[in-house]
Amino acid sequence: MRKLFILLFFPIIVLAQPTSSSIYERRHEFTFGAVKLLAGPIVELNYEYIFREDFTFGTSVLVNGRNDNDWEEDFSVTPFVRFYFQERKEFAAKGFFIEGFGKYSNGRNNDYGNENKQRYNSASLGLAGGFKLINRTGFVLEIVAGGGRTLGESKNAPDFIFRGDINLGYRF
């Protein structure tokens, strides 16, 4: 009788296990730059794909809504790769990271001695570092700061670029 009971209820127990994906299996992440959005109508949207627990790649797109503010960039596209120092299978891509990025941007040179703002298009390479937190529901808080150098010789483009913000978002 005992063997019959086990034989009948074993398939039910096996099929009763949850099969939905949890926060630990989510690989896509969207964030936005909160500080830039509060400082002016500057929208920076980021997408990140989690390739491995310690390696991700993504892109960031920035659009400046006004031409009369002090932010030099009107538009930029920034592809990046990140290497995370904490390899945790339950929360991939979390904790401290270092980032390598390339950036294409166009905008106006805000030379304060010159009222005539010259337009520029430039490409640059740089490094950044940061820290990412994620909670069980999928919300993300990320702090990023870094810089890079402009490639080539463009007299209107800035020599040094800054990359940084406090990003808020969601992992799905």
Image: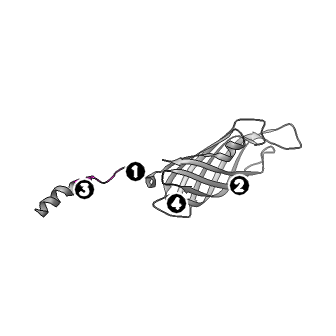
Please name whichever residue, 130 or 119, is drawn nearer the observer in this view of the structure: 130
According to the picture, the residue beneath numbered tag 3 turns out to be: 13
Question: Dividing the picture into quarters, in which one does residue 13 lie?
Answer: bottom left
First in sequence: mark 2 vs mark 3: 3
Image coordinates of residue 96 in percent, x first then y, are: 59, 61
Q: Is there any visible trace of residue 84 in the rendered image?
A: yes
Q: Residue at x 56, y 56 (%)?
A: 133
* CA gap, disc 1 and disc 2: 37 Å
Residue at mark 2? 147
Amino acid type for the residue under numbered disc 3 = Ile
Q: Separation of disc 4 and disc 3 at Cα?
A: 35 Å
Separation (CA) of disc 1 from disc 4: 20 Å
Sequence-wise first label, 1 or 4: 1
| Above or below: residue 97 compared with residue 47 | below
Q: Quadrant of the N terminus?
A: bottom left
- Report if the CB atoms under discs 2 and 3 are less than 8 Å apart: no
Disc 4 designates what residue? 54
Nearest to the eye among marks 4 and 3: give it: 3
Between disc 1 and disc 3, whose residue precedes?
A: 3
Q: Given contact means CB atoms under 8 Å apart, are the residues at marks 1 and 4 in contact?
A: no
Compared to residue 96, the image places residue 27 above or below, namely: above
Q: Which residues are magenta?
A: 12-19
Which amino acid, by three-letter code, is at mark 4? Asp
Specify which label sits upstream in the sequence, 4 or 3: 3
Q: Residues within 10 Å of mark 4 (few under 14, many from 20)?
A: some
